[in-house]
Image (cartoon, helix red, strand yellow):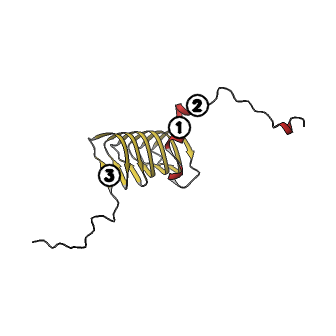
């Protein structure tokens, strides 16, 4: 016989942890609450206000937006986060927008990093952050600099 409490809440005070285990493949768009750990393959977009870690066997291709990102496996695509850490053996091939970034001496980073100016992830929207090729293609062919009208005669 079990003892049941009448006042037990159906909502947990703990944050959820989402895991994509080794051998599993997921593709699509995810918006998650809580932490996420990837040991399998993921292709698509992940939005999280919490931490994401990519394990040694994890491979992510796409866009990740998270508070803190820790990479021990492979990440290809775009990253928007407050802090990115690349562990020993971790490989990141991405355009990164982050407040902080650290790389273990045995980690690998190939890409471009821009420093995030705002401390809030909510202030950055993914459409404003273009991929490398799109950013280059959106640049004008020619830039002409000219002095304002009141300075031309000086």
Marks 2/1: CA distance? 9 Å
Q: Secondary structure at mark 2?
A: loop
| Residue 14 seen in this snapshot | yes
State the mark number for residue 17: none
In the picture as drawn, the residue positioned furthest to the front comes out as 6
Can you give x and y, in whole percent of width and height, for residue 83 in the image? 49, 52
Nearer-N-terminus badge (3/1): 3
Q: Which residue is mark 2?
A: 138
Q: Which residue corresponds to the image point at 78% horizontal and 33% vertical from the top-left?
A: 146
Q: Is residue 89 visible?
A: no
Q: Are marks 3 and 2 in contact (CB under 8 Å)?
A: no
Residue at coordinates 15% horizontally, 73% vertically from top-left? 3
Residue 115 appears left or right of 6:
right
Q: Residue at x 81, y 36 (%)?
A: 147
Q: Quadrant of residue 59?
A: top left
Residue ID for mark 1: 130
Foreground residue among 34 and 37: 34
Residue assigned mark 3? 18
Residue 150 drawn at (x, y percent): 86, 39
Please, what secondary structure does the residue beneath circle 1 have? loop
Tell me residue 111's x, y (percent). 51, 37
Q: Quadrant of the N terminus?
A: bottom left
Q: Say which element carries label 3.
A: strand
Kindly indicate whether the residue at mark 1 contacts the one at mark 2 (C-beta within 8 angstroms).
yes
The disc, 3 or 2, on the residue closer to the chain's N-terminal end is 3
Report the mark closest to the observer, 3 or 2: 2
Taking the spot 57% from the left edge, 53% from the top edge, the residue there is 118
Between residue 125 and residue 44, name the one nearer to us: 125
User: How far separated are the C-alphas under marks 3 and 1?
Assistant: 27 Å
């Amino acid at each position: 016989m079990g003892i049941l409490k009448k006042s037990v809440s159906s909502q947990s005070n703990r944050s959820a942890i989402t895991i994509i285990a080794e051998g599993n493949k997921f593709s699509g768009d995810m918006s998650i609450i809580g932490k996420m750990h990837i040991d399998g393959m993921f292709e698509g977009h992940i939005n999280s206000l919490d931490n994401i870690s990519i394990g040694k066997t994890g491979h992510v291709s796409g866009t990740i937006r998270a508070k803190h990102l820790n990479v021990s496996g492979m990440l290809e695509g775009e990253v928007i986060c407050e802090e990115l850490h690349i562990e020993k053996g971790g490989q990141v091939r991405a355009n990164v927008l982050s407040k902080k970034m650290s790389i273990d001496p045995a980690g690998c980073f190939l890409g471009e990093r821009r420093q995030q100016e705002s401390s809030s992830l909510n202030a950055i929207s993914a459409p404003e952050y273009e991929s490398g090729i799109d950013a280059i293609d959106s640049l004008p062919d020619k830039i002409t600099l000219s002095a304002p009208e009141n300075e031309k005669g000086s």
